[in-house]
Amino acid sequence: MRNKLFLVSAILFNAAVALAQEVKFEEYNLDNGLHVILHQDNTAPIISISVLYHVGSKDEDPERTGFAHFFEHLLFEGTENIEKGKWDQIVSSHGGSGNATTDEDRTYYYEVFPSNNLQLGLWLESERMLHPVINQKGVDTQNEVVKEEKRLRVDNAPYGMFIENIKKNLFNKHPYKETVIGKMDHLDAATLEEFIAFQKKFYTPNNAVLVIAGDFENDNAKKMISDYFSSIPKGQDISRNFPQEDPITEQINAKAYDPNIQIPATMIAYRTPGLKNRDSQVLDMISTYLSDGPSSKLYKKIVDEQKQALQVGAFPATQEDYGMYIVFALPVGETSLETLNTEIEEEIEKLRTDLISENDYQKLQNKFENQFVNSNSSVEGIANSLAEYYMLYGDTSLINKEIEIYRSITREEIKEVANKYLNPNQRLMLEYLPEQNTAN
């Protein structure tokens, strides 16, 4: 009885904490199509200004991959009113920080400032949208930056090429088969006119969302947004009609070789639905159950108890159109990859066959409650979430409601989704090997 009372108390406490974290926001559109989201929080003198563009690697010409990631760098080069190379200096000299990220579906730029620099942040992002300078010198400079990044993070990094090998085997038709960083020969071959055309098509107000989160006054912020962004011309409408993948009905076997590793790895991947599909949240929960922390099923069994693996993990790579569910493990000593595959499949088969225990289910719920609270604990995190929920999910209010989806997932649903997507005939089995094994 004491355990049951404690469990009920813990659930009520977590629910109360989550409710206290409700994010209030206002959203509206400018005439040029720019979507604006405002989250006012005057508890600390900090402001986050961000712009998310609905453009990622999937939007590229297959003969010009890497453009979206390239523009992540290129649009820091300078504008008509910001001297080349001065962007970061302007931000840091006003006590701020900033960065950008790109993936398959979107590109996200942001700055965080003391709140008295809201106007500066809005000016910077309006300059990026309206007045970017795209010339051959800037293209050549960033081309070298991107090549160096690829050398460091992909070509010369241990296990740095595993995602690209998974993607090219899981996807045959959809542009998700390409990498975000792209092919360097595509960037080398691109003309200045092609870069300019890409910017004009995708980096427009009607393909973007502007988010302000933090310490500001609503009316003042709205006036500045209008002053800096309302005159930016609307871009062309963008239509997307990507080819659909055929279902995977037979196991795909593949090998990849990496000169930067000494220990081989097994990588098992499944193609899963896009992020708007409820099943993607269930798979997120399955991932946490299998490999989040030393008490998770795969880690406890293969690493801790049986000592067959140095490391094991599972994670869902959620994307707008399709997702990937990836399980990986690095063997210990003479343990074979086949043995690891067998042990991993045994745990996944249990998910397909049996309901997880009530105790494990409650642990999952507690973890997702904590993740929810932590994701809304900073203005930077809130700004990012608001932008992505609006642009990719089509529902900004998910910032408060998505936790309800996780709360409503049942043990029976976990079993059902495992049976729907995580079967042996639906998977890629990738042997990721040191390069010296090529001749074998």
Image (cartoon, helix red, strand yellow):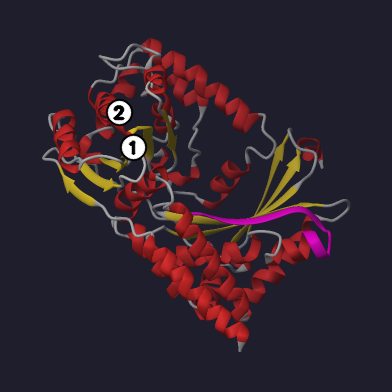
Q: Residue at x 67, y 33 (%)?
A: 157
Q: Is residue 307 magenta?
A: yes
Q: Is residue 170 left or right of residue 160?
A: left
Which residue does the numbered mark 2 point to in the structure image?
A: 117
Nearer to the camera, 50 or 63: 50
Q: Quadrant of the N terminus?
A: bottom right
Q: Are marks 2 and 1 in contact (CB under 8 Å)?
A: yes
Q: Secondary structure at mark 1?
A: strand
Q: Is residue 148 above or below residue 382?
A: above
Nearer to the camera, 307 or 382: 382
Q: Residue at x 42, y 69 (%)?
A: 16
Q: Is residue 308 left or right of residue 370?
A: right
**In x, y percent, where is residue 116?**
29, 30
Q: Quadrant of the C terminus?
A: top right
What whole-number distance in Å separates the C-alpha atoms at marks 2 and 1?
8 Å
Q: Residue at x 33, y 23 (%)?
A: 194
Q: What are the residue bounds of the magenta stretch?
A: 303-317
Q: Is residue 165 above or below residue 122?
A: below
Residue 47, numbered circle: 1
**In x, y percent, where is residue 108?**
38, 37
Q: Can residue 361 be seen at all in this image of the molecule? A: yes
Q: Residues within 10 Å of mark 1 (few under 14, many from 20)?
A: many
* Furthest residue in direction right, as rendered: 334
Q: Is residue 248 left or right of residue 64?
A: right
Q: Is residue 28 left or right of residue 394?
A: left
Q: Secondary structure at mark 2?
A: helix
Q: What is the chief secondary structure element of the magenta stretch?
A: strand
**In x, y percent, where is residue 221?**
20, 37
Count numbered badges in the picture.
Answer: 2
Rendered image quadrant of residue 150: top right
